[in-house]
Amino acid sequence: MRNINEDTITQAVIAAMVGCKNPRLRTIMTSLVQHLHSFAREVKLTEAEWELAIGFLTEVGHITDDKRQEFILLSDTLGLSTLVTAQNNAKPLACTDSTVFGPFFVDGAPELPLGSDIANGARGEPCYVSGQVRGLDGRPVAGASMDVWQSDEDGHYDVQVPAASGEHTHRARARLHTDAEGRFNFRSILAVPYPIPHDGPVGRMLDALGRHPWRPAHLHFMIVATGYERLITHVFRDGDPYLDSDAVFGVRSTLVADWVRHEAGPTPDGQQSEVPFYTLQYNFVLNPITVDEVQK
Ligand code: BEZ
Ligand code: FE
């Protein structure tokens, strides 16, 4: 294999993978090489642009650690996360739509009883959330595990705020379990719009592209129940100015709900609030796992 040129390089790289023992890996890498080379040919990529791209990816790697995932941000802002989510989560129309996972989920959030205040000191206006989890057949899903996470009123998730003690404190996140009727309720804080982390290479990329980093106000949910597909989604707040320009392309109309404002007074948990508060009511519909999928 010598004298490779502009016309023969793609085939040469593909042929070099002939010994790959993993057929899926070979399919993926063959297609990746074909598309990457077509892209470079189409835009007539210069050497200076290639160097810039390598520098950019190097920076994305350097800023990434166990708290900051710039590669996921890059995938999100380029729409790749939404594409992968959409093509892997096709389901009947009546089921709750999935949307992007995002980088702020924490495994092992505190398991709290229904009705708890999950804010745990996170600042924001009080918000009472309730609803029901059902299957596609309408039957309530009892005992479903429900992870909830959100930012505080400054738009920060707990993992973005360094803890004075060095110990991570879970705030505005929890794991709950639905009751015998599939119902859930908890107290938290009002979701607000916030910018995705934009002090790194992805922020610079958005800026250069004339894009803003804002996400519309939302609450994250991950619901897991035996016999159903895992649901990873958000509920978005109606009226938010960024619903039609989400920096990570995650909004679906079916996931937009009304957060109702109430003056100070009696709250859904039978207490009195001295300040205005919000309520959100949202029901989820899970897609059952078919026998075929179980056997896969
Ligand atoms: C989030 O909603 O938490 C999120 C999603 C994608 C990128 C950044 C943040
Ligand atoms: Fe979020």
Image (spheres, helix red, strand yellow):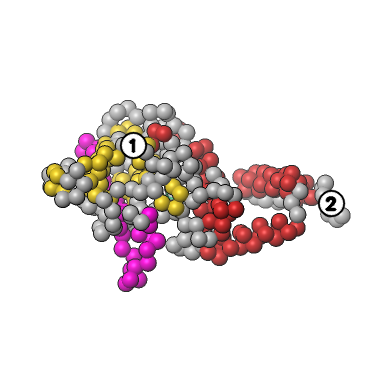
Is residue 264 left or right of 77 when viewed as pictured?
Answer: left
Q: Secondary structure at mark 1?
A: strand
Residue at the image point whose x is 70% and y is 60% from the top: 51
Q: In this picture, is 284 found above or below 12?
A: above
Residue nearest the viewer, comparing 71 with 264:
264
Q: Is residue 90 visible?
A: yes
Which residue range is magenta in the image?
Answer: 155-184
Residue nearest the viewer, comparing 201 with 24:
201
The residue at which mark 1 appears reads as: 257
Residue at the image point whose x is 21% and y is 47% from the top: 276
Q: Give percent across and percent down for residue 175.
A: 29, 51
Q: Give percent across and percent down for residue 294.
A: 42, 37
Residue at the image point whose x is 54% and y is 44% from the top: 79
Residue 164 part of the magenta segment: yes
Q: What's the mark number on residue 5?
A: 2
Residue 200 part of the magenta segment: no
Residue at the image point whose x is 34% and y is 68% from the top: 163
Label 1: few (<14), some (14–19) or many (≥20) C-alpha neighbours in 10 Å: some
Q: In this picture, is 171 found above or below 272?
A: below
Is residue 284 left or right of 49 when viewed as pictured?
Answer: left
Q: Give percent across and percent down for residue 136.
A: 35, 29
Q: Which callout, 1 or 2, points to the residue nearer the camera?
A: 1
Residue nearest the viewer, comparing 22 with 248:
248
* Mark toward the start of the polypeptide (1 vs 2): 2
Type of secondary structure dominating the magenta stretch: loop
Is residue 120 left or right of 30 when viewed as pictured?
Answer: left
Image quarter of residue 224: top left
Q: Give percent across and percent down for residue 264.
A: 17, 46
